[in-house]
Every structure is written in structure tokens, then in C-alpha cells.
Amino acid sequence: MKEFNITNDYCKRVWNETRAQYPDQEHFLQAVGLVLESLSPAVDSIRGLKENAVLERFVEPERIIMFRVPWVDDKGVPRVNRGYRVQFSSAIGPYKGGLRFSSEVNLDILKFLGFEQVLKNSLTTLPMGGAKGGSDFDSHGKSDAEVMRFCQSFMTELYRHIGADTDVPAGDKGVGSREVAYLFGQYKRIMNQFTGVLTGKWLSFGGSLVRPEATGYGLVYFVERMLASKNDGIEGKNVIISGDGNVATFAAQKLIRLGAKVLTLSDSTGFILDEDGIDEEKLNYVMAFRAERKKIDEYVKKYQKAKFFKGERPWKVKADIALPCATQDEIYLDDAKVMVANGVKIVGEGANMPTRAEAIECFIKSGVLFAPGKASNAGGVAVSGLEMTQNSERLHWTFEKVDNKLKSIMYGIHDNSAQTAKDFGCADNYVLGANIYGFKVVADAMMAQGLV
Ligand code: NDP
Ligand code: 2IT
């Protein structure tokens, strides 16, 4: 793991204690290390942190729920998975954050995601605490009926820990609109209550317009603002994207509509490169085969000028902008060096922590503008927050209204992060700016509420 430059004594103590407590939680430690590094220049200027043990509490989840999820497959064979909910912080609002279904899911992954979510939700300026949950269930190759039975069993335990004013889960990797619908149906059946207990719901039962698009669109709005800060724009830029799921495809859609050229998409099997650019018709084809759970090489079967690179990620392709939108640990130091040499000017994280800490350092030192996921992918949870508001009002807002609010939230996150970085003498360091800005609000609420 990277040696973090944690210069403040209080931050250093908490870092050493956290490392000693959770030596095996590599992703969680990386997330904490990066934040404590960023907070080092700021903590002495925030009064009362040490006296109120704010950092010690900030790195420790309020509650972790773990349970077994028994279900029966289509052959009648009983199966058992592990289910989790990490309720990290309720300092500024009810716990809020997605559910991930993927074989890689464990406490390390969910604690890093929950920790990041606390700061991300704070950056949106909406009243949401932070949480993450999920299961090591992998829906690849499972039938709809199996996914439904799994979701019903998962919710049969989770329901007692969540609620519209307690904890409001949503989707994440491996949990899309199909899973959210099954989870909602089972919650309603058990509780006999129709409430906004989940976000990312379908429009027909309390969902919000723009929620499916929100993370990808929000990412592009953020990147637009980064470019604008350098008197530049998106039109004509070459963009490489990883992933072909929710975040990746809607980022691509917005980029295409703004006149950029999208060169790549990927999944866990490899990536495709289309030198002519992926236009909207081609993207619709991707969305259609992805809905049928087909893999990315399907693309080259139809568009034969494009190439499929099995088992590879797209980072060697020359481009102006790179948007990692699949999962954690996608860009390592060696990838970063190639990208810098290729002239990449902006890296915007659509996924959560796709860039390793060493690679982030390389980008920042090389003058590449780097947007950390907690800032640049906050559009999804921001529109989740707007879905909660609409559910409370029992109203639906128009597409235009939600989209405008999303855009102004993303611009706000950009501007607040950029200004904070500048205030600390580190202009263009969005990692530092986002971490300090997000933390201040949470710390203020934690100190006000006493030692809880
Ligand atoms: P999806 O499940 O819709 O898509 C995930 C994509 O990543 C798929 O293309 C998938 O390919 C690929 N992928 C998954 N695991 C790997 C792997 N180990 N190596 C290479 N590719 C992989 O998820 P989302 O688009 O919703 O989420 C993507 C990322 O964005 C995650 O990090 C998530 O936490 C983050 N995020 C999501 C938000 C949302 O609103 N959905 C909000 C903010 C962040 P395959 O199908 O082959 O597995
Ligand atoms: O990582 C994320 O921000 C999400 N998966 C979205 C969470 C949410 O509650 O909408």
C-alpha cells in the first residue's frame, strides 16, 4: 500500500490505530488513508475535533449488520449467501447508500464504500448519512426467478434495519432496477407500508425521473465544469470509458449528446474500441444487449470495424478524458503512467475508488485534473435524495426539473471542492478539496450531537 503523507499528529494517531485494528481491510484502509492525508492541513483549524474524538468516531461505522441469506435455486437446491449493511454515519441524515451484489463483496469492500458514501452524501448538501450494503450473491447466469427469491430472502432480514427515516438503500453494482423492484415488493409485503424505503424505484411506484441517468450524467456535468474552469469544453474531446453498466452507458449518452467522441466501453471480459466513435445508435444497441445480460464482445459482432480486447482495460487507448466507470482497482500506477504519456488531461471517477492511491498521486503530480468518485459520481445519490423528497411530498417532478437540480448540485460540488483546495494552497487538487469540504459538515454535526 502507498505510504500516505499524513502530516498532522492527530490524523497520524488515528491512522495508526485504524491500521492496527483492521490490518486486512486493504480497501477500507486506502480510503481512510487518502482522507486523513487530505485532512492533515485542515484539522488544526477546526475547533474541538480531538476533544470530541471526532476522527476516531468518523472512521468507525455506527453499526454493522451481517446475516445469512438462504434461498432455493431453480433446481430446488438450497443455497446460502452472506448479507450485510454497514450503517456508517447518521450525523447529517438517515443512512443512505447502495446495495452491491457481487462475489467480491466482503466487509472490507463495504466499509470502504460506506466510508466514502458519508463524505459523498455530505458534498451533495442534501440531508443524508452514509451506508452501504449488499451480498456476495452473483447474479451472472441466474434466472429472474432465482434473483427474485434471493432478493425476497435478503429483504426478509434487512427490512427490520431500514426505513424511510432510518436507512434508505438503493442500487449499486449488480443491483439495478430489477433487484430494487423485488426488494421493494418484499419490504411492502412484510411491513404493509408503501414508503420511500428504497430509491431507484421504477416510475410506476415512486421512482424519480433522471435517477437511472443520474450518476453518468452527473459525472459528465462535473467534467464539464472542470473543463470550464480551464476555459475549455467537452465538444470534440476523445473519451475512454470502462464499464458498460448503469454509470458507463449514461455517461456515454450524455457525452455523445454534448459532441464528444466515445471510443471505448468494457465489462469484466474485456473492452471494445471503436475508432469511429460510439454513436447513439450503437450505444442503444449496447444497452439492449446488456439488458439481455450479454457480454461486451456482442458489439463487434454487429460493428465489425470495432475491436474487442479480451481481458484488458482501455487505458492504453489515446484520449483526452478517461472515465473509469466499472469498479474499484481499475487504474494502477503503470496505467496512470501510460495515460499521462498519452496526454490524458482529465480523469473523472464514475466508479467508487477505481484509481489506486499511487495512480492518483501520479495524476496530480503530472498536472492531470483528477476528480475523485465521492465528488464526481455523487449525482446518483443526489437524485436519490431528490427521490426521497418527492416521496415525502407524494409528488413527481418533471425530467427537466430533476435534471436542472442535478446539474446545479454537481456544479456546486465542483465549485466547493475547487474553492476549498484553493483556500488550502492546493489549487486543482479535487481530492483534498472534496475531502475537507465534505468532512467539515459531518464533523460539525457530530460535535453538536455529543458523544454518540
Ligand atoms: P453495473 O452493475 O450496472 O455495471 C458494472 C460494470 O462494471 C459492468 O460493465 C461490469 O461488467 C463491470 N465490472 C464489474 N466488475 C468488474 C471487474 N471486476 N472488472 C472489470 N469490470 C467489472 O454497476 P453500476 O454502473 O451501477 O456501478 C459501477 C460503479 O459505479 C461501481 O463502482 C459503483 O459503486 C459506482 N457507482 C454507482 C452508482 C449508481 O447510481 N449506480 C452511483 C455512484 C457510483 P460485468 O457485467 O461483466 O460484470
Ligand atoms: O455509490 C453510490 O453513490 C451509489 N451506489 C448510489 C447510492 C444511492 O443511495 O443512490
Image (cartoon, rainbow, N blue to C red):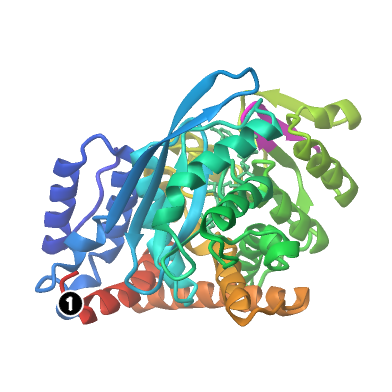
Which residue: 45% across, 30% down?
A: 81
Q: Residue at x 86, y 49 (%)?
A: 279
Side of 43 relative to 66 (left or right):
left
Is residue 271 within the magenta segment? yes
**Taking the image as four quarters, which one is ligand 1 found in?**
top right
Q: Which residues are magenta?
A: 266-274
Camera sees residue 335: yes
Main SS, magenta residues: strand
Quarter of the image containing the C terminus? Answer: bottom left
Q: Residue at x 61, y 27 (%)?
A: 312
Where does the N terminus fall, quadrant-wise?
Answer: top left
Q: Is residue 227 magenta?
A: no
Q: Which residue is mark 1?
A: 450
Residue 425 is at least partly visible in this image:
no
Q: Residue at x 65, y 51 (%)?
A: 181
Horizontal side of residue 318 vs 6, given as left or right:
right
The one nearer the camera, 12 or 79, is 79
Above-or-below relation of 222 to 102: below
Some atom of ligand 2 lies within 8 Å of the CB belonging to the residue at label 1: no
Instruction: From the viewer's perspective, tell me whether residue 191 is left or right of residue 402.
Output: left
Is disc 1 placed on a helix, strand or loop? loop
Question: Residue 219, percent across and down?
Answer: 62, 61
Residue 262 percent across, percent down from the top left: 76, 48
> At which x and y percent is residue 411?
58, 75
Q: Is residue 97 above or below residue 342?
A: below
Q: Position of residue 186 (x, y in %)?
A: 58, 50
Q: Nearer the viewer, residue 77 or 392?
A: 77
Identity, as a three-letter code, of the amino acid under mark 1: Gly
